[in-house]
Structure formats: structure tokens, C-alpha cells
């Protein structure tokens, strides 16, 4: 009964529904009057013919004729009666078989069905929902962010103004709230003051509106906004954004950091206090053909290889890991140790030929500026003359044409950076460049995370996606800790040593076997131990920290198994 009451209550909730209900009631009244009128005329004509019938028989005859059943058990004998029967039949066809179904569907069934549909996707959240992440739009970043939030057990809700689209997202298993991200009432209904974070991931103008609107309701909720135009950063901050991310610039710099050119031998990708984490390609150095068990790296520099990349495949290297020209080491140590490594390997210079950048959008331009800052030569290929931002280094033309690539120096370039916003184009160009130059380093951008593995198979040595970088940056702000994205789905992060692990030898801790994470270093006060041995007891100091590498899923397993928490940066 309670369910029926709630369903019927929908029809008086809005003015439109009340109007529809009035129209339906009027039609039914007209139909009742028509049936009563026909029943009265039935009796009049039947009496004129000398036939007598009850009032119930009159209603029975009227309904059977109007519904076209026409049993034929009651008939008129006169022409007048037959004409009357025809009129009743035709009006019944119109009213009962055409108008009534249409009116019922239009003004009753369709609104009722819409009521069921609307109740599937909420327009508000109960007060019990707290510490949730609100996401303004379902874009590539949100697509990557949502599974990571789910892996960490963090509630989230997408804001979607279109009911049809909201239903589609709900059918895909996503948490959705119907509401415009630019409407202040939406934030009242979703409890923005109780939220852990709001992600403004639309365009710059809408993100500004979102930040300003939200700040009218709450001055404390963290707002992470994405900025496409550098000029929008100040405006977004003035509107109330807590953190403004320029993902295109971040991605371009990250791609440039992976570039093998000139005397470059190691690029810092993260710092955790005194610990420096860097990537270093071994091509052209004495490390090629050796195994880490030879001890050359640790004896000469003191650095520890905590990971290795081989054409997009990440492994934790052991003593027998053989280094090839395609190996890129993930090194951990101090600043002084990294400097020692750079000085020892600087004499093994890679090519001084310009790095080739395909695409001069925001990502390509940011990569070019990063290379320029490092003093590395580069050339850009851009098909659209209107998109050229660095004319002195740009060749206008289609990168799919061989003579354009040869003019840009593809035969000599140490690295090709593929930066277009279209993943299909990036896959095409990666395959093309790999066929032209089997030995060249290819660093590619992906927009969607799902295309990362395809780009690796196409021949890219490194792939970083816009979506993953954005999701990682949001999680970094949300969790308030230091996180470094090593590559797609693989992060370096630090945690305080859980109570259950204090004093336990690392080899017996079950960290690697039970969670999939690998311990990169142990930090206790000013003492930093990189690549700690299995027999090392973990510090009992509550302030000591572990620095680990693993996927988002691995991290979630670690946090759950040991009841751990992120160390604050």
C-alpha cells in the first residue's frame, strides 16, 4: 500500500503531471457521458420497435458495440436502429480503440513509466552519504578515476543533467545523480558540504562556474579543477578552486622526461624526502649485456634498481635480470648517488640529432618547451598551419607522409614523441615510425587508458595517458600523500609503517606475496635505506615510513591487509 501511495503521489508532484491528470479525467468523463447517452437512446429506439430491455442490458449492448465485439444477441429491426448501431460502432472505434489507448499511454502510462525511471537515478543524496567524491562530467579522466576510487573503497557520484544519459551510465554500473553541475540546487541536493572532494572536469568556463557556485554553499570542500588554457588558472583559483591541474602541460613534460637524447641519462620522476626516484635508459652504456648481479651499478654509484621497463613491460629486477638496449631502469637513491650515475654515464652520449615531436597541440608544445629547457634540439611536425605555436622549429605537413618525416629528421632522431589527441592516429604513427626506424625510441601519448596496451604492441617504448595522469593527480590531492605515477597503473607511494609490521623482518612481512607491492626504501628519521634486504627488521618507530611501488589494486590490498594510511607529504 505504501508503494502504491508513493507511485500515485508522483502524479501530483509537478504542474505538468497535474495538468496531464486533469486531461485524462476529462476524457474519461466524456466517455462515460457518451456511454450513458447511447444507453438512453438504445432504450428509446428499442421501445419504438416494441422491444423492452433493462438498463443493464442497455449498457451491455452499448459497450459490446463500441468495443466492436458485437455478439449479435441484441439487434434492432428498424433502419433507424441500424443507423444508430453504426454510429455507436464508429464512435466506439474512435474513442475506445484509438483515443483511449493514446490518452492512457500519453497521460498515464508514460508518466508512470517515467516515474519509475526517475526513481532509478536519484536527484539527491541522503544525509548518511559522506566523504564522497563528486565528479562533474563523465570524461576519460573520470573513466579512469572511478575504478581507482572503487579499488580504494571510496564512494563517488557523477553529476549528469540529462536523464537519458544518466540512465545509460546507471546501467553501466556507475553511481549517478541527475543534476546540472552548474546549478547551485544540485550541490545542495548532493550534500557538497559533506563531500571529500569536487572534481570540475568540464571546460574552463564551466569549471569556473562550478567552483564559484560551490563556494557559495561551502568554503572548505576541496575543489580540483582542470584547466586547458594557462590563462584560466588564475581565474579558476579566484573562483574558489583549491587545486588547478594543467594536464596537457603535465603530460607533455612527462613525455619529454622519458626522452633519450644528448647527454641525458637519468630523469627524476619523484622525490620522497631525501629519496630520489629516476628513470635511466641503459642503451649505449656499459650496462648493456650485464646483469644486475654483476654489482656494477651499486658499487659504482650506490643506486639501487627497484624496477625495469622493457618495451612497456614492468618487472622487479633480480640478480639475473639481463639488461638489453631496450631496458630502462627505475633507480632509487640519494641526489648525490644519482649525480654520480649521471657523471659516469654522460660520456656515453646518445645522438645529438633533434628529437622529433609529432603534433603541436598543448601536449606537444609542452613537451617541446620541456626539451628546450633542457637544452635539447627538437623538431615538430604539425599538419594544421593554424596550430603552429613554435614556427622556428616546426615543419608543416602530414606526419603520415614519408618525405615530411624525412625532412623532419626521422632517420637520425634519437626519439619520436607522438602527441596527437586522437589515439587511432597515435597508433598509426607509432607503427609507421617503428617500421621506419626499428632502433628509435618512441614515446607516445594516449587519451584513453584502454589504448595504452595497443600502443605498446604497436611499438611504443613508453606510453602515458591523459586519463591516467589526471586520475592519479586527483587521487594524490584526495589522499593527501606523495604519489608518483611511474607508468600506466603503476605508482610509487609512501605509507607509515603499520603497527602489525613494526619489528618484523621484511622477508617475513608478506608485503610482496600478500599485496603485490614492492618495498623500494625504508625511511626512519634521516636514515634512508634503499632496496632493503629481506632480513632487515622494519623499524618500530611510529614515524618511520615505507616507500612502495605497485598498482592501485596492490595499494588497496596493502592498506586493507595492514590497516595502513598514507604518509602526508
Image (cartoon, grey):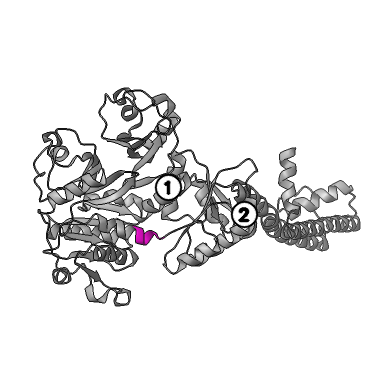
Q: Which residue is mark 1?
A: 476
Q: Which residue is mark 2?
A: 218
Residue 117: say if magenta: no
Q: What is the span of residues highlighted in magenta in the rendered image?
A: 246-250
Dot 2 lies on which element? loop
Front residue of 12/397: it is: 397
| Residue 552 x %, y % | 38, 40
* Crowding near the residue tagged with mark 1, few <14, some 14–19, many ≥20 C-alpha atoms within 10 Å: some
* Crowding near the residue tagged with mark 2, few <14, some 14–19, many ≥20 C-alpha atoms within 10 Å: some
Query: Disc 1 and disc 2: Cα gap in Å?
Result: 22 Å
| Residue 123 x %, y % | 62, 51
- Residue positioned 23% across, 76% down in the render: 392
Image quadrant assignment for residue 276: top left
Quadrant in which the C terminus is drawn:
top left
- Residue positioned 31% across, 64% down in the render: 366
Image height check: is 378 above or below 475? Answer: below
Q: Is residue 544 left or right of residue 91?
A: left
Quadrant in which the N terminus is drawn:
top right
* N-term mark: 1 or 2: 2
Dot 1 lies on which element? helix
Residue 86 visible at all: yes
Image height check: is 148 above or below 25? Answer: above
Amino acid at each position: 500500500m505504501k508503494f502504491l501511495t508513493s507511485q500515485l503521489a508522483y502524479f501530483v508532484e509537478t504542474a505538468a503531471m497535474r495538468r496531464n491528470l486533469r486531461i485524462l479525467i476529462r476524457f474519461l468523463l466524456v466517455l462515460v457521458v457518451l456511454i450513458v447517452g447511447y444507453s438512453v437512446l438504445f432504450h428509446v429506439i428499442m421501445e419504438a420497435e416494441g422491444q423492452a430491455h433493462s438498463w443493464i442490458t442497455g449498457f451491455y449492448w452499448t459497450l459490446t458495440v463500441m468495443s466492436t465485439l458485437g455478439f449479435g444477441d441484441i439487434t434492432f429491426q428498424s433502419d433507424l436502429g441500424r443507423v444508430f448501431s453504426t454510429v455507436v460502432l464508429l464512435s466506439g472505434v474512435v474513442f475506445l480503440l484509438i483515443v483511449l489507448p493514446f490518452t492512457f499511454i500519453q497521460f498515464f502510462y508514460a508518466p508512470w513509466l517515467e516515474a519509475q525511471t526517475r526513481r532509478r537515478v536519484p536527484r539527491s543524496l541522503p544525509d548518511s552519504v559522506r566523504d564522497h567524491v563528486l565528479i562533474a562530467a563523465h570524461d576519460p579522466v573520470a573513466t579512469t578515476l572511478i575504478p581507482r576510487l572503487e579499488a580504494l573503497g571510496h564512494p563517488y557520484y557523477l553529476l549528469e543533467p540529462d536523464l537519458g544519459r544518466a540512465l545509460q551510465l546507471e546501467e553501466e554500473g556507475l553511481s549517478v545523480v541527475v543534476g546540472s553541475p552548474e546549478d547551485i540546487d544540485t550541490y545542495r541536493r548532493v550534500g557538497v558540504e559533506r563531500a571529500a572532494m569536487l572534481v570540475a572536469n568540464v571546460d574552463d568556463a564551466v569549471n569556473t562556474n562550478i567552483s564559484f557556485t560551490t563556494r557559495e554553499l561551502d568554503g572548505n570542500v576541496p575543489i580540483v579543477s582542470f584547466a586547458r588554457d594557462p590563462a584560466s588558472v588564475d581565474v579558476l583559483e579566484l573562483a574558489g578552486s583549491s587545486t588547478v591541474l594543467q594536464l596537457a602541460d603535465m603530460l607533455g613534460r612527462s613525455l619529454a622526461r622519458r626522452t633519450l637524447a644528448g647527454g641525458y641519462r637519468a630523469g627524476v620522476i619523484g622525490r620522497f624526502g631525501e629519496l630520489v626516484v629516476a628513470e635511466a635508459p641503459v642503451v649505449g652504456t656499459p650496462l648493456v649485456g650485464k646483469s644486475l648481479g654483476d654489482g656494477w651499478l651499486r658499487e659504482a654509484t650506490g643506486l639501487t634498481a627497484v624496477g625495469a621497463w622493457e618495451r612497456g613491460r614492468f618487472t622487479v629486477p633480480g640478480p639475473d635480470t639481463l639488461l638489453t638496449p631496450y631496458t630502462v631502469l627505475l633507480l632509487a637513491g640519494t641526489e648525490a648517488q644519482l649525480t654520480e650515475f649521471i657523471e659516469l654515464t654522460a660520456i656515453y652520449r646518445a645522438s645529438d640529432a633533434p628529437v622529433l615531436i609529432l603534433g603541436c597541440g598543448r601536449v606537444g608544445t609542452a613537451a617541446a618547451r620541456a626539451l628546450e629547457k633542457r637544452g635539447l634540439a627538437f623538431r615538430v611536425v604539425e599538419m594544421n598551419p593554424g596550430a603552429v605555436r613554435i614556427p622556428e622549429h616546426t615543419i608543416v605537413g602530414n606526419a603520415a607522409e614519408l618525405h615530411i618525416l624525412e625532412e623532419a629528421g626521422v632517420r637520425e632522431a634519437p626519439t619520436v614523441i607522438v602527441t596527437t589527441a586522437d589515439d587511432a592516429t597515435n597508433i598509426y604513427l607509432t607503427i609507421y615510425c617503428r617500421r621506419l626506424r626499428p632502433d628509435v625510441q618512441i614515446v607516445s601519448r594516449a587519451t584513453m587508458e584502454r589504448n595504452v596496451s595497443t600502443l605498446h604492441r604497436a611499438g611504443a617504448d613508453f606510453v602515458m595517458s591523459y586519463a591516467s595522469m589526471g586520475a592519479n593527480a586527483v587521487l594524490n590531492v584526495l589522499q593527501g600523500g606523495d604519489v608518483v605515477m611511474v607508468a600506466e597503473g603503476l605508482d610509487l607511494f609512501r605509507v607509515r609503517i603499520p603497527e602489525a609490521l613494526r619489528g618484523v623482518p621484511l622477508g617475513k612481512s608478506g608485503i610482496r606475496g600478500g599485496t603485490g607491492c614492492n618495498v623500494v626504501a625504508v625511511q626512519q628519521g634521516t636514515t634512508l635505506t634503499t632496496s632493503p634486504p629481506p632480513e632487515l627488521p622494519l623499524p618500530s618507530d611510529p614515524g618511520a615510513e615505507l616507500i612502495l611501488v605497485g598498482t592501485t589494486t596492490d595499494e588497496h590490498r596493502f592498506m586493507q591487509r595492514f590497516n595502513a594510511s598514507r604518509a602526508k607529504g
